[in-house]
Amino acid sequence: MIAQGSKEVIFGENRYRYDPLHYFLVTVNLPTITHVVDATKQCPYLSVSVELSSSLVSSIMVESGYAPSQTRGDKRAISVTPMDVNLQDAVLRLVRLLDSPDEIESLMPLISQEIIHRLLMGDQGGRLNHLALMRGYTPDIAEAVNLLRQNFNQQIRMEELASELGMSVSGFHHQVKEVTAMSPLQFQKQLRLQEARRLMLNEDLDAASAGFRVGYQDASHFSREYKILFGNPPMRDIQQLREDRRGVVAS
């Protein structure tokens, strides 16, 4: 949730922008590009993130008698939804506990349960239901996403991974794309390029070294794919990011 300012999240070919009138929900840890859109020194960007336990979501579903829609819903792991007044009030009360640390232990679990209840009753109840079911979607797809994240810099044969999970190649591709909005290879590529960007920006690696670190053997191939995703060659992109950072600090 954002209290002040706005933010944009880029995931694959999709862009999600949210602000104080919308909340952002993500049910799988995905490679995204994020940047603050509106922020100044006088009106800084202010936001709060709440991590939801899949086991707690499951128990709230049982206790409240929540029945997910039987129609086929959107399983994509990211959504932006208009803010509900009751949900906003619950999150604000959670944040205010920072001013009363002695009450956190007793009140935080209750407010967290209310937040989950509000989400389940809202427009994204079906999506949150996927988070509760075996930690999101199916255990096979959850495991596949985790394997791709953990081994993003390795050569992975998708046919072997699908077979290992007991799925057909086409079924595996379909289910991964349904959740991540990308094919397995595209998902792995985004992981690689995001990590390379981080290495260049935060650890001052040159483009060739960063590309090699994330699994690219050919520097020119790395630069081409990097430019396709981020719009500029590696070092020009990093220079622009650093200039943008200095501009935010100066403002």
Image (cartoon, helix red, strand yellow):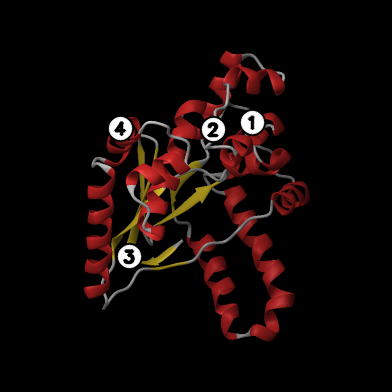
Q: Residue at position x 48%, y 42% from top? A: 78
Task: Give residue 141's mark.
Answer: 1
Q: Are marks 3 and 1 in contact (CB under 8 Å)?
A: no
> Disc 4 and disc 2: Cα gap in Å?
31 Å
Q: Earlier in the sequence, mark 1 or mark 4?
A: 1
Query: Seen in the image, is 153 located left or right of residue 203?
Result: right
> Disc 3 and disc 4: Cα gap in Å?
38 Å
Q: Quadrant of the C terminus?
A: bottom left
Query: Seen in the image, is 39 located left or right of residue 10?
Result: left
Which residue is under mark 3? 5
> Disc 1 and disc 4: Cα gap in Å?
32 Å
Q: Is residue 185 above or below residue 197?
A: above
- The secondary structure type at the circle numbered 2 is helix
Residue 206, x across and y down, in percent = 34, 50
Which residue is under mark 4? 220
Q: Nearer the viewer, residue 178 or 186?
A: 186
Task: Give residue 179's mark.
Answer: 2
> Disc 3 and disc 1: Cα gap in Å?
35 Å
Residue 47, x across and y down, in percent = 44, 66
- Neighbour tally class for label 4: few under 14, some 14-19, many 20 plus, Cα within 10 Å: few
Q: Is residue 185 above or below residue 57?
A: above
Q: Nearer the viewer, residue 185 or 38?
A: 185
> Disc 2 and disc 3: Cα gap in Å?
28 Å
Q: Nearer the viewer, residue 129 or 46?
A: 46
- The secondary structure type at the circle numbered 3 is loop
Residue 186, x across and y down, in percent = 45, 29
Q: Earlier in the sequence, mark 4 or mark 2?
A: 2
